[in-house]
Image (spheres, rainbow, N blue to C red):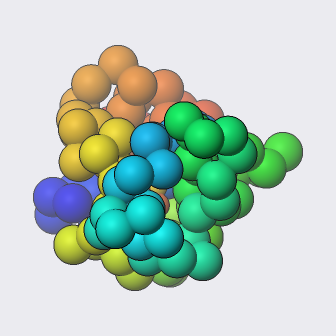
Amino acid sequence: MTADCKECGACCASFRVDFHPSCGEVRGGLVPEGFYEELTPSLARMRGTDDARPRCRALNGRIGQAVSCRIYEERPDPCREFEAGSPACLRARRRHALDH
Ligand code: SF4
Ligand code: SF4
């Protein structure tokens, strides 16, 4: 997370966060057990990101104020690849009524 992201967190409460189960702790990967669920043999998802009002279970804090990722060093690839300032970032911020 950049300095800006530490005052935002909108993307962690907007999108499904999916990855391959091999990236989860249960299968020898990094993402800690309990923060995700395996849906199929080829699909795992961060808990909370598919809720009607999505919010990743690993997100701490208040969106738009001060946030942190509880598993930052072990977060899954989609989180590592997500770019601040990208169209998806701006969509997430708009969804939470945050100006960029
Ligand atoms: S929505 Fe954009 S600015 Fe906000 S935390 Fe995610 S990447 Fe950072
Ligand atoms: S794992 Fe961390 S960075 Fe990824 S969506 Fe959840 S809170 Fe955000």
- x 52%, y 76%: residue: 33
- Asked if residue 74 shows in the view, the reply is yes
Question: How many labels sit on residues?
Answer: 0
Determine whether, in the image, residue 84 is placed left or right of residue 23: left
- Asked if residue 64 shows in the view, the reply is no
The image position of residue 22, as x and y in percent, is 39, 52
Q: Which sits in the foreground, 78 or 62?
A: 78
The image position of residue 86, as x and y in percent, is 27, 25
Q: Which sits in the foreground, 22 or 13?
A: 22
Q: Which sits in the foreground, 81 or 25?
A: 25
Q: Quadrant of ligand 2?
A: bottom left
- x 21%, y 72%: residue: 73
Determine whether, in the image, residue 63 is placed left or right of residue 52: left
Q: Quadrant of residue 48?
A: bottom right
The image position of residue 27, as x and y in percent, is 43, 63
Q: Quadrant of residue 9?
A: bottom left
Quadrant where the N terminus sits is: bottom left
Up-down: is 7 above or below 42?
Answer: below
Up-down: is 69 above or below 20?
Answer: below
The image position of residue 95, as x and y in percent, is 60, 35
- x 57%, y 47%: residue: 44
Judged from this view, the residue extending furthest toward the left is 2
Quadrant where the C terminus sits is: top left
Judged from this view, the residue extending furthest toward the top is 87
Determine whether, in the image, residue 35 is placed left or right of residue 49: left
- x 54%, y 36%: residue: 42
Determine whether, in the image, residue 86 is placed left or right of residue 14: left
Judged from this view, the residue extending furthest toward the right is 52
